[in-house]
Image (tube, helix red, strand yellow):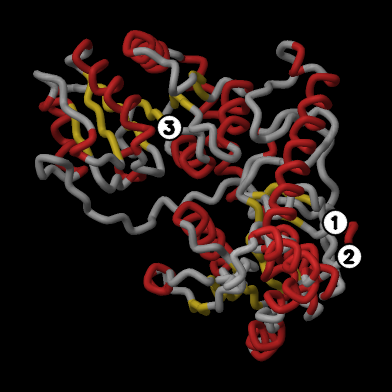
């Protein structure tokens, strides 16, 4: 059996995908990793064949108009909308982009569910596709709030059935208004309009997708999906048909850069220091080094003046955007690149933004978390699920004070309830792997023997 794993190449997704590929290979299912990002070096390091794909993102080409009449230009673009759309879409050559899939006799393409242009191309070639999701459930299902909201079912008005329905209505209305505006301003050459046109031109059935969500993730209603999350971490709700949870993919043996902190210490030196001085190690991480995070990072550093028996590993950060409080230099390590798994391996607690891969890695290594949602994409929904299942303490990053930070971390470090919940969930993660849910799902799907998933075509 041979599978093509089609991924975006973004760091978190790539790490999870390589763990997925490793599990399939161990079960004698050959894997080729394909991406439009140049991640060949990392893929080859893990021992997999890599295929570089042409970038076929549907974006309008910028044009310069000699006519200074803006209204006239806009009207002209709308009059020629269909021609302009088809000119952009014509850059997608289905056969040229994916002829190699036929040549290599690929049995199944497992495609990142956000790579819409590639999914349309593969469907047009009658390729068997299994969508790969890194998200918790995002479909409009009974009992399930919008993934971008902080709503927890059963708590308050918005956690009621009516409250969640109103939240979905508001979310869809906002999305539709946003897309209408983009469509009008761009004269139909925004990405969503181009995707809808490309779908129609390639014969992609309209009832396969929730077009009000395009180009957001997980917008397909009928195509089969495997989710790299645990069903046990979801809110109780009616599951989407043609969906199977295969459990989190955490590659514990991945190669990490041997980075050094602001005074030249590597992770192993910090591990030894914390052990000798019997310090509580707290890791604080984010995926960005944006200035908007600097105020929180500074409050966090200031909070450590109160706790001489704690040690903070913070990263990634720009050293020139924050200042170390006096007397804390021996208990703080600042990293511009943070080798997260290495740091988590001896951490007593972690502070994170609610990113799905950081959540999975910290639970896998049984590290309790203070989750401060970054309010991006699914982070609110992830934080809400952690709070619901007593897997973390949830606070607001922009509102939390130095005093509240210390009190929350003290509560976290001393909470036997959270530690028990995390240990139990870590065992559930391990059970997914021991039961080979992923491997059996893919093998049975290729053989046409799976009782929950069905391939289209």
Q: Residues within 10 Å of mark 3 (few under 14, many from 20)?
A: many
Q: Is residue 309 visible?
A: yes
Find the distance from the CA under tag 2 to the CA under tag 1.
Answer: 10 Å
Specify which label sits upstream in the sequence, 3 or 2: 2
Q: Which mark is residue 352?
A: 3
Question: Which residue in the structure is indicated by mark 2?
Answer: 205
The percent coordinates of residue 56 (x first, y second) are 61, 73
Q: Nearer the viewer, mark 2 or mark 1?
A: 2
Q: Residue at x 66, y 66 (%)?
A: 110
Question: Which residue in the structure is indicated by mark 1?
Answer: 222
Q: Is residue 89 left or right of residue 5?
A: right
Specify which label sits upstream in the sequence, 3 or 1: 1
250 to 26, vertically: above or below: above
Find the distance from the CA under tag 3 to the CA under tag 2.
Answer: 40 Å
Quadrant of the image for the N terminus?
A: bottom right
> Mark 2–mark 1 contact, CB under 8 Å?
yes
Find the distance from the CA under tag 3 to the CA under tag 1.
Answer: 34 Å
The percent coordinates of residue 417 (x first, y second) are 51, 15
Q: Is residue 130 visible?
A: no
The percent coordinates of residue 258 (x first, y second) are 22, 53
Q: Is residue 124 left or right of residue 376?
A: right
SS at mark 1? loop
Specify which label sits upstream in the sequence, 2 or 1: 2
> Mark 3–mark 2 contact, CB under 8 Å?
no
353 to 280, vertically: above or below: below
Q: Is residue 352 left or right of residue 174?
A: left
């Amino acid at each position: 059996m041979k599978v093509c794993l089609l991924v975006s190449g973004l760091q978190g997704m790539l790490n999870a995908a390589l763990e997925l590929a490793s599990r399939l290979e161990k079960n004698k299912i050959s894997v080729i990793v394909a991406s439009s990002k140049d991640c060949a070096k990392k893929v080859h390091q893990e021992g997999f064949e890599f295929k570089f794909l042409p970038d076929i993102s549907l974006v309008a080409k910028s044009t310069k108009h000699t006519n200074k009449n803006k209204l006239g230009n806009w009207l002209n673009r709308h009059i020629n909308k269909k021609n302009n759309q088809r000119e952009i879409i014509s850059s997608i050559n289905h056969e040229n982009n994916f002829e190699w899939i036929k040549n290599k006799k690929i049995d199944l393409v497992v495609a990142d569910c956000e790579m819409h242009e590639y999914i349309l191309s593969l469907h047009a070639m009658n390729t068997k596709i299994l969508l790969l999701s890194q998200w918790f459930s995002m479909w409009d299902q009974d009992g399930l709030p919008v993934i971008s909201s902080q709503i927890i079912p059963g708590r308050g008005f918005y956690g009621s059935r009516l409250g969640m329905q109103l939240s979905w209505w508001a979310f869809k209305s906002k999305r539709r208004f946003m897309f209408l505006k983009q469509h009008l301003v761009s004269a139909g050459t925004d990405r969503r309009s181009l995707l809808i046109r490309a779908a129609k031109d390639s014969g992609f059935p309209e009832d396969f997708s929730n077009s009000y969500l395009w180009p957001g993730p997980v917008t397909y209603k009928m195509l089969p999906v495997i989710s790299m999350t645990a069903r046990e971490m979801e809110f109780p709700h009616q599951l989407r048909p043609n969906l199977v949870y295969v459990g989190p993919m955490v590659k514990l043996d991945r190669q990490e850069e041997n980075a050094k902190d602001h005074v030249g210490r590597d992770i192993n030196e910090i591990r030894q220091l914390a052990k000798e001085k019997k310090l509580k190690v707290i890791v604080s991480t984010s995926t960005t080094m944006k200035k908007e995070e600097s105020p929180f990072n500074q409050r966090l550093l200031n909070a450590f003046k109160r706790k001489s028996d704690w040690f903070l590993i913070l990263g990634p950060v720009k050293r020139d955007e924050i200042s170390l409080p006096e007397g804390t230099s021996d208990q703080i390590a600042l990293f511009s690149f943070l080798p997260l798994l290495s740091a988590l391996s001896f951490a007593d607690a972690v502070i994170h933004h609610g990113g799905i891969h950081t959540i999975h890695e910290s639970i896998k290594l049984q590290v309790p978390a203070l989750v401060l949602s970054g309010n991006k994409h699914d982070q609110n929904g992830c934080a809400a699920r952690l709070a619901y299942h007593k897997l973390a303490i949830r606070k607001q990053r922009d509102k939390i004070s130095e005093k509240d930070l210390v009190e929350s971390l003290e509560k976290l470090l001393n909470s036997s309830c959270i530690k028990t919940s995390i240990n139990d969930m870590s065992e559930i993660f391990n059970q997914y792997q021991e039961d080979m849910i992923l491997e059996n799902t893919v093998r049975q799907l290729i053989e046409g023997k799976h009782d929950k998933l069905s391939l289209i075509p």
